[in-house]
């Protein structure tokens, strides 16, 4: 009877280690997702601030064409935001995988294959995304708000170019 209990204890001990690994990785992944949110928020703030400054400067200096230069800045800001959104999507995928494994552990604590096929740390999955992948994020219907935000800023720039002729 003692011989049969030893393997069960060993399996439970390995699973306890496995669940601790998953919990730690889940915590780190959520931290990374939060950092991406923070960076995306800062990028939007800088895009808004920079656009406003360029528009104000172009009108005050009677250089209406400078307001159109803002469009190039907006493309750079949207690209930067989409890079972080790409990283965030990869981290969210990884956290979903971890959540499923933790749920599996909670259903059957003695499950042996808790870490089967598991790639610890999503950082190993992160790669600098291609330009195609970055802009393909805009094709996702749930991400259209990103495009709308920058299009609105672009419209303000174009509007400032048109209005600047009459204000000055």
Image (spheres, rainbow, N blue to C red):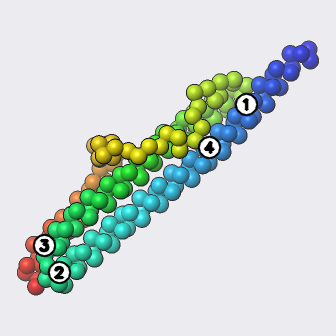
Residue 15: assigned label: 1
Q: Position of residue 95 (x, y in %)?
A: 54, 41
Residue 53 falls left or right of residue 81? left
Question: CA gap, disc 4 to disc 1?
Answer: 15 Å
> CA separation, marks 1 and 2?
65 Å
Q: What element carries label 4?
A: helix
Q: Residue 59 carries which label?
A: 2
Nearer mark to the viewer, of 3 and 1? 3
- For image coordinates 18% across by 72% down, the residue present is 67
**Residue found at the very far left of the displayed protein:** 166
- The answer to the question of whether label 3 and label 4 lie on touching residues, with beta carbons closer than 8 A, is no
The reply to whether the C-beta atoms of the residues labelled 4 and 2 are less than 8 Å apart is: no
- Using the numbered discs, state the Cα–Cα distance from disc 3 to disc 1 in whole angstroms: 64 Å
Up the image or down, 14 lies above or below 163; here it is above
111 relative to 147 in the view: left or right: right
Residue 15 percent location from the top left of the image: 73, 31
Quickly name the residue at label 4: 25
The residue lying toward the viewer, choosing from 80 and 105, is 80
Q: Using a 10 Å C-alpha cutoff, classify the residue at mark 3 as few (fewer than 14 neighbours), some (14 to 19) or many (20 or more).
A: some
The residue that mark 3 highlights is 65
Quadrant (top left, top right, bottom left, bottom right) of the N terminus: top right
Query: Which residue does the image show at 77% across and 25% down from the upper left?
Result: 11
Q: Do the numbered discs 2 and 3 sit on residues whose CB atoms are within 8 Å?
A: no
Q: Which of marks 3 and 4 is in front?
A: 3
Query: Residue 102, located in which quarter of the rendered image?
Result: top right
**Which mark, by number, is residue 6?**
none
Q: Is residue 101 left or right of residue 96?
A: right
Question: Observer-nearest residue: 79 or 7?
Answer: 79
Q: Residues within 10 Å of mark 2 (few under 14, many from 20)?
A: many
Considering only order in the chain, which callout, 2 or 1, is on the residue closer to the N terminus? 1
């Amino acid at each position: 009877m003692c011989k049969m209990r030893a393997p069960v204890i060993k399996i439970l001990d390995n699973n306890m280690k496995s669940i601790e690994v998953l919990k730690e990785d889940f915590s780190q992944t959520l931290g990374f997702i939060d950092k991406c949110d923070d960076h995306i928020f800062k990028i939007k703030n800088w895009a808004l601030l920079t656009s406003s400054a360029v528009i104000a400067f172009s009108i005050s200096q009677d250089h209406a064409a400078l307001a159109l230069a803002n469009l190039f800045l907006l493309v750079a800001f949207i690209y930067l935001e989409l890079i972080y959104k790409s990283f965030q999507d990869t981290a969210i995928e990884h956290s979903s995988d971890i959540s499923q494994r933790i749920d599996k552990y909670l259903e059957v604590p003695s499950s042996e294959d808790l870490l089967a096929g598991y790639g610890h740390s999503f950082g190993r999955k992160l790669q600098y995304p291609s330009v195609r992948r970055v802009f393909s994020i805009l094709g996702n219907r749930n991400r259209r708000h990103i495009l709308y935000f920058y299009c609105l800023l672009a419209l303000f720039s174009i509007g400032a170019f048109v209005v600047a002729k009459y204000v000055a």
